Amino acid sequence: LVMHPKYQSIVGLGPSVVPLLLRELRHDPDHWFWALQAITGEDPTHPDDTVTQAAQAWVKWGQERHYL
């Protein structure tokens, strides 16, 4: 999934796409975590998080950094 050319092109957009990905996670938790980590160099999730928990961690991270 993360190696798909379209996914990679989104990562290639860089930091400008972070708010969009975070809004998407807020409404539809999905596997954007690798993209966010690749773009930001951060990972607010825990290894045992569910997809929903990981999405919530990223949304909280984005709010704290004023992306949302």
Image (spheres, grey):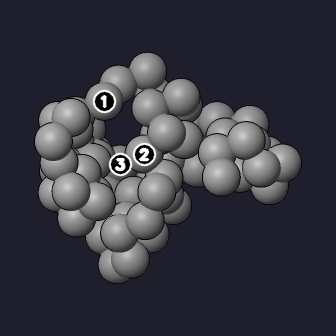
Where's residue 24, x and y in %? 44, 69
What amino acid is labelled 3 in the image?
Tyr
Number of labels in the image equals 3
Q: Is residue 58 above or below residue 41?
A: below
**Any mark on residue 58, and which?**
none
Disc on the earlier residue, 1 or 2: 2
Q: Quadrant of residue 27?
A: bottom left
**Residue on which disc 2 sits:** 33
- Asked whether the residues under the numbered discs 2 and 3 touch, taking CB atoms below 8 Å apart as contact, a structural biologist would say no
Disc on the earlier residue, 3 or 1: 1
**Residue on which disc 3 sits:** 67
Identify the residue at the far top of this view: 41
Where's residue 36, x and y in %? 47, 40
Q: Residue at x 35, y 25 (%)?
A: 42
Q: Residue at x 21, y 34 (%)?
A: 47
- Asked whether the residues under the numbered discs 1 and 2 touch, taking CB atoms below 8 Å apart as contact, a structural biologist would say yes
**Any mark on residue 43, and which?**
1
Q: Residue at x 43, y 21 (%)?
A: 41
Circle 2 residues within 10 Å: few <14, some 14–19, many ≥20: many
